[in-house]
């Protein structure tokens, strides 16, 4: 179990669960699709032990947070994180987002740059069209009818029992365990509904529908780290490489032997990369003039002015 306690706060009438602990510079950790704050368990323990304040929320529709009918777009998630940080009296943080969480992190940096001291994208969505066939298939009409068959509760319960036995015997397969947790979370009707609304806001049968590529030049104002597993089967490594080339001054770290969850598969190595990045960069001091300058320069260059 994580040393970071799970807490709840009510925002706009909806309960939001989050983990928070430690002292020092703030790191906000944003999980991926069908995930929760639990995905960061090993990372949070390491960061807190090394002198950081960690905040790891369950996004609405995920984990133990509420799952209301409503807006599950990247913009809505970003606004929700702004409000959570406001309630927690946090004025700025290093923002770390994995998969869907990477898209949310970029949206937060775009909408509310004053909150973002550094940006860290981990196997991030929103950087290209390609994504796994399974996610694309689940956006097809009628997925609501098929999902109870694909994700039955009795299979979840049986699988959880097997996982406990393997854990007790010291057998670990972190990436499989993380994928199983995502699978198991979809056994509940409320979770499936929220998952589909989230998925369809960013993916269609052809692939990802939301892309930050045309705005990545704005990230030059913020220290940016891109981390990818070279065995990622969900989102291609090439997306990370392209983002690195588009963001002036960014760093690109490829973790060999890792898949889509490098923070789970190799938490120690992941934290070493993250902490080195934090230690060797200065937090951004977002000024409206900085972003206006980038916008004007890009407009002039692309308009031929």
Image: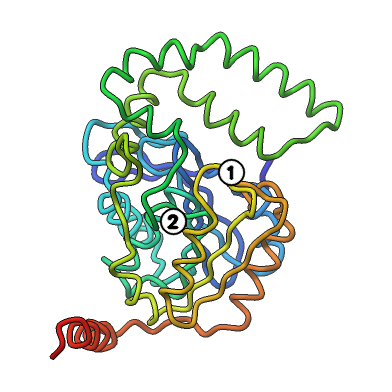
Question: Which quadrant, please, contains the N terminus?
Answer: top right
Name the residue located 28 percent from the left edge and 67 percent from the top edge.
Answer: 214
Indicate left or right for 229 with 290 as reference. right
Q: Which residue occupies the foreground of this view, 48 or 73?
A: 73
Locate residue 164, reporting x and y percent. 74, 23
Q: Which residue is mark 2?
A: 102
- Whether 279 is drawn above or below 5: the answer is below
Question: Which quadrant, please, contains the C terminus?
Answer: bottom left
Name the residue located 74 percent from the left edge and 36 percent from the top edge.
Answer: 173
Indicate left or right for 283 with 49 as reference. left
The label number, if any, that marks residue 225 in the structure image = none
Name the residue located 64 percent from the left edge and 54 percent from the top edge.
Answer: 230
Locate residue 86, reporting x and y percent. 33, 62
- Whether 206 is drawn above or below 230: the answer is above
Name the residue located 44 percent from the left edge and 10 percent from the top edge.
Answer: 149
Locate residue 185, reporting x and y percent. 49, 26
Q: The residue tagged with tag 2: helix, strand or loop? A: helix
Q: The residue tagged with tag 1: helix, strand or loop? A: helix
Indicate left or right for 239 with 11 as reference. right
Taking the view exactly as shown, the residue that stands out farthest to the right is: 169
Q: CA distance from mark 2 to mark 1?
A: 14 Å
Q: Which residue is mark 1?
A: 39
């Amino acid at each position: 179990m994580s040393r970071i306690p799970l807490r709840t706060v009510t925002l706009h009438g909806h309960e939001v669960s989050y983990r928070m602990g430690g002292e020092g510079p703030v790191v906000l950790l944003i999980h991926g699709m069908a995930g929760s704050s639990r995905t960061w368990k090993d990372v949070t323990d390491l960061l807190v032990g090394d002198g950081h304040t960690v905040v790891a929320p369950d996004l609405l529709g995920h984990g133990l947070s509420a799952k209301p009918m409503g807006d599950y777009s990247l913009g809505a998630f970003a606004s929700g994180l702004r409000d959570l940080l406001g309630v927690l009296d946090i004025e700025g943080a290093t923002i770390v987002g994995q998969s869907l969480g990477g898209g949310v992190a970029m949206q937060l940096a775009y909408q509310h740059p004053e909150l973002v001291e550094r940006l860290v994208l981990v196997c991030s969505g929103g950087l290209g069209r390609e994504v796994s066939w399974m996610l694309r298939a689940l956006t097809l009409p009628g997925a609501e009818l098929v999902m109870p068959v694909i994700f039955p509760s009795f299979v979840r319960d049986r699988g959880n029992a097997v996982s406990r036995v393997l854990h007790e015997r010291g057998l670990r397969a972190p990436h499989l365990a993380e994928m199983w947790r995502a699978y198991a979370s979809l056994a509940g009707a409320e979770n499936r509904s929220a998952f589909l609304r989230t998925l369809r806001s960013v993916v269609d049968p052809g692939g990802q529908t939301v892309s930050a590529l045309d705005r990545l030049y704005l990230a030059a104002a913020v220290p940016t780290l891109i981390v990818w597993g070279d065995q990622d089967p969900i989102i291609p490594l090439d997306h990370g490489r392209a983002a690195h080339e588009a963001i002036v001054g960014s760093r690109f770290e490829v973790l060999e032997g890792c898949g889509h969850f490098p923070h789970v598969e190799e938490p120690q190595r992941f934290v070493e990369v993250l902490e080195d990045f934090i230690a060797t960069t200065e937090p951004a001091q977002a000024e409206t003039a900085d972003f206006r300058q980038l916008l004007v320069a890009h407009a002039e260059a692309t308009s031929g002015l």
